[in-house]
Image (spheres, rainbow, N blue to C red):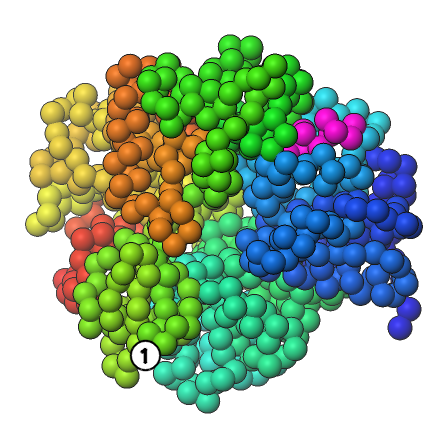
Amino acid sequence: MQWEPASFQEAAWEAFRAGKSGLVNAPTGSGKTYSLLIPILLESPKPRGLQAIWITPIRALAKEIQQSAEKAIVAMQLDFTVETRTGDTSAAQRAKQSKAMPNLLITTPESLHLLLASKDGGRIFKNIHTLVADEWHELLGSKRAVQLELALSRLRGMHPQLRTWGISATIGNLVEGMDVLLGPNFPDDQKALIRSGQKKNIEVLSVLPDDIDVLPWAGHLGIKMLEKVIPLLEESESTLIFTNTRSQAEIWYQRILDVAPHFAGLIAMHHGSISRDLRFWVEDALYTGLLKVVVCTSSLDLGVDFRPVDTIIQIGSPKGVARFIQRAGRSGHQPGASSRIYMVPTHSLELVEAAALRQAVEDEMVEERVPYFRSFDVLVQYLVTLAVGLGFKAEEILAEVRGTFSFQSISAEEWQWCLDFICKGGNSLAGYDEYHKVVVEDGLHRVIQRRIAMRHRMSIGTIVGDSSVRVKLERGANLGSIEEYFISKLKPGDVFWFAGRNLELIRIKGMEASVRLSKRKNGLVPSWQGGRMPLSAEMGQVLRLKIEESFNPQSKDPELKLIAPLWEVQKERSLVPLRHQFLIEKMESKEGHHLFFYPFEGRAVHEGMGALLAYRLSLFKKISLSIAMNDYGFELLSDQPIPIEEALDSDILNTRDLRHDILQSVNAIELAKRRFRDIASISGLIFKGYPGAPVKDRHLQSSSQLIFNVFSDYEPDNTLLLQAYEEAMEFQLEEGRLRQALERIEKQETVIVEIKKPSPFCFPILVDRLRQRMSNESLEDRIKKMKLEIS
């Protein structure tokens, strides 16, 4: 079969041949990989050494890119080598590559920095002419993007004519995304933004219950919809079931087998905590069509080409449009093919989110990826990386660093602080030899101690997670890893589900848990911290629109028709707010006095807004308030009446003195401490341990808190300390979105409604608060009791 290149591919080839750099924007499955792979192969007719680097955000995608490149090389009859180098690459393969690099290396930002830390860096990068950042939108908005920016600054320093290209799905700030990749000083006439112009046809279908009462008012698992999902699995050749958390994936996998045991051997699970060998097996089995169903998380969001997959099922709202489109693109993953995705609501109000997702997909309303800016923890790690490798001259590297988007504004004083930090630990830690990592010899900054160099190489990276315990069968098979905080709560003999198996804990020794298979049917499901994703601003906007549309008889959304009886209950007990209205519900119960606010802005914004209003209310009356929130709204609860009317008369929802009031309202020190732990790890202030002997989680926590306290007391202007407070404001409390939400609310009509019984809007918030302090069984009993009380 003859392949005809798409017009955007030809445009990319032409721009590449002209020596330009830029970004290729095309939908999933459109052939965007070959838009840059082909010109790289043609650029090097007689390649010597490493010619090009292909950066991928995930290991699974590296394998797929390699397969695509090898097909092209064979078809074009080229003498060209391609290999991968990731965390999954064996030590033997790494050693082989150190002697002779392939012509095209597919790798991750972390592995690229490890190469920069090599003494052979000059030889390795001698002939490189191109770097491609695949799935750039996934890196953008994380510190891994900053890491790549810095690596690029060094490669451009070696090769000023280096071509730099990104491949990205559609995001709200595509031009800015290209500018982050290329840097602020890149000549405009050498930039090229290649858009495919192809709109992926995505069919969004909801899996609806026969009756609205089937769906709970609150919940996040969606198991009640299982009987509607099974027929979809039966009808499809192959299906990916996306869940939002690893715990949810484990539960759905087990429940499907309970209800449809004939799927045994045809169903598998894929998430980031499962062992590499198991993940690879699942990916290969999907590719060859051996598997019918895979239950997965974001571990299969990106790039991997599973041609047999014809159905995608999303369990619960993904909370973001871009994520939903990315997952939909796993089906119909070929040029011109349509994608179909089924949305399975896990509770009643997610019916509206399903309708909102369909609308957002039709309108191509996708989120922006906000880039990190001035992440000094990443910068000081990078400087030590260079010092471990060939060493660096400060003036030369400063000029390169200022050529990055993240550090274009770095001052001479801030640069000097970074140098002082890596050489002597800054002002506060100068008395401790372990922070004297870098020495200066003849103007060259170098690491000369082998122990420091080894520990640094082990610590390179910006992905900071909780300590993990490896789970192994007693006869040796490695199943994957579970976060330490979960497994440490178990006793020998306890049973838990993991990697699709029911396991009994035998013992925990160090950071390894020995287990055996169990025949007991009941077991705990591991929970992973940080699994919940907040509602995006774009989703919140469309959600408010769809709530108002629910009362339009001409609405074509089946979800809105199904949810109509619930709106009748909401109207009977309270109010369904229109877009120009801001609803506050007021209720008194045995627990105390409740206020419920509904901005529909997402959990993170509601956390900040709830704390802000609690602080401002305390200025009117000495009052103690507790806060609970979900993606739709938040609750303030007190044992005494809350003076909300008086506060509203005094304009409590304004944006004046916002940052000051936020810092007063939350435990800013505690929030900054949380951020500082990651900053301390990335910057090298704390060492996470050696392979097989990591430092325990609680010890890392106490070490980072100790350093945080030292900086707070003796060096309050410490750059990393200030960064921790800034990150807490921007990424924990989302100050920017909070300000925009308050500005919108100020223009709305505020409506206070006194309710006698919990409304469908406030019930999920009440349940969320209970979930934090009850076991699943106790919570289920409490919800049933609450339903009886309010019916």
Q: Quadrant of the C terminus?
A: bottom left
Q: 439 or 172: which is nearer to us?
A: 439
Check disc 1 and report the residue beneath it: 517
- Who is closer to the viewer here, 273 or 762? 273
Three-letter amino acid code of the residue under disc 1: Leu
Q: Quadrant of residue 109?
A: top right
Q: Which residues are magenta?
A: 151-160
Q: Secondary structure at mark 1?
A: strand
Answer with left or right where residue 16 lies relative to residue 512.
Answer: right
486 left or right of 206 in image: left
Q: Is residue 304 magenta?
A: no
In which quadrant is the N terminus drawn? bottom right
- Does residue 576 lie above or below 502 as drawn? above
For image coordinates 13% across by 38% down, the residue present is 638
Residue 254 appears in the figure = yes
Does the magenta stretch mainly form a helix, a strand or a loop? helix
- Return the x and y of residue 40 as percentages of the image width and height: 83, 48
In the image, taking residue 2 as reference, residue 721 lies left or right, namely left
